[in-house]
Image: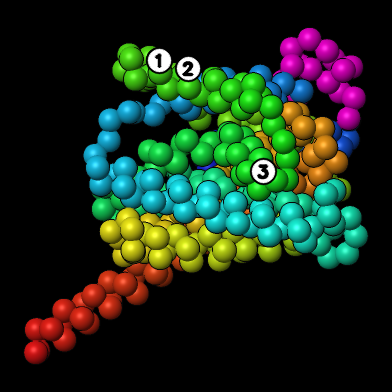
Amino acid sequence: MHIKRAIDKIPGGMMLVPLFLGALCHTLAPGAGKYFGSFTNGLIGGTVPILAVWFFCMGASIKLSATGTVLRKSGTLVVTKIAVAWIVAAVASRLIPENGFEVGMLAGLSTLALVAAMDMTNGGLYASVMQQYGTKEEAGAFVLMSLESGPLMTMVILGTAGIASFEPHVFVGAVLPFVIGFTLGNIDPELREFFSKAIQTLIPFFAFALGNTIDLTVIAQTGLLGIMLGLAVIVVTGIPLIFADRWIGGGDGTAGIAASSSAGAAVATPVLIAEMLPQFKAVAPAATALVATSVIVTSILVPILTALYSRRIKRLQVASAQHAAIK
């Protein structure tokens, strides 16, 4: 049986399939972890420790050295994505109740869900798309996107937008594993190579643990809203990213549309934020389901839209060159 091959055919499958299995487990046997105890309970309820190891390995994988072009492009996209998410958070906090919408078509939507879906780019998706439709330097711009992984940027956005208040030591605790990994990876390239191999391996484990915090009825209730959220992520972040890439990043906008996705790691953000601030515990399950759906939607649509945009730009460039040649 080619199980992995089948999972890989699903956009974000290595994250989403274990997430669904975890949700199925939680829905049908919510007390399974405590019943079996020991290592089984650790796998079912170990979201935070598994993610801590994953963030450490993610930090270790990032190289400090990068060309100026890569840093310029990557920095432009990262800063723009975070700025847009901050604006969305500031506006949403004035329109959405603290515990999110509880009834109606928007039931389950919260400021936390919006920020988590919008403030991180799917770096792997971006790199693979830009290898096909962009330059080598543009594809390499995913280097700084790894810095968005984890709850830190979401914490910064929620804190500076006045939505939540985090103690300084909580910020340090959130970023410390990443920083230690980053430091070790840049001191010793062999350590970087060693820890980098664990990044993909850990994804299904923390996804399964995350799924065990979600009831399948929540996923069913937020399905359509999650699709709408995914479309909103592409439109709301994609347009500013295109302009930023053209005006600041020195590109033609293709990298901007390629970066308008929700990262798979963002699925973990609502639960992690709720662990630090109990005020978000009520909205975390629905927010997790919404972000998971957004990951699927953007993983499917962003490559298609990037291809269409790139072809259009190339046609315009050819037409412009022909027009200039005639003159």
**Which disc is residue 158 wearing?**
3
Q: Residue at x 74, y 28 (%)?
A: 276
The residue closer to the viewer here, 298 or 58, is 58
318 displayed left or right of 180: left
How many circles with numbers are drawn on the protein?
Answer: 3
**Dot 2 and dot 1 residues touching (CB under 8 Å):** yes
The amino acid type of the residue labelled 3 equals Leu
**Which disc is residue 222 wearing?**
none
Please tell me whether residue 138 is drawn above or below residue 18 in the rendered image.
below
Within 10 angstroms of label 2, few (less than 14), some, or many (20 or more) residues? some
Secondary structure beneath dot 1 equals: helix
Prevailing SS of the magenta stretch: helix
Q: What is the C-alpha distance between the residues marked 3 and 2?
A: 24 Å
Report if residue 34 lies within the magenta region: yes
Q: Nearer the viewer, mark 3 or mark 1?
A: 3
Is residue 305 in view?
yes
The percent coordinates of residue 138 (x first, y second) are: 31, 50
Give the mark nearer the N terminus: 3 vs 1.
Answer: 3
Please tell me whether residue 113 is drawn above or below residue 55 in the rendered image.
below
Quadrant of residue 106 within the rendered picture: bottom right
Residue linked to disc 2: 180
Q: What quarter of the picture does the C terminus occupy?
A: bottom left
The amino acid type of the residue labelled 1 equals Leu
Report if residue 45 lies within the magenta region: no
Secondary structure beneath dot 2 equals: helix
Residue linked to disc 1: 184
Q: What span is in magenta?
A: 30-44
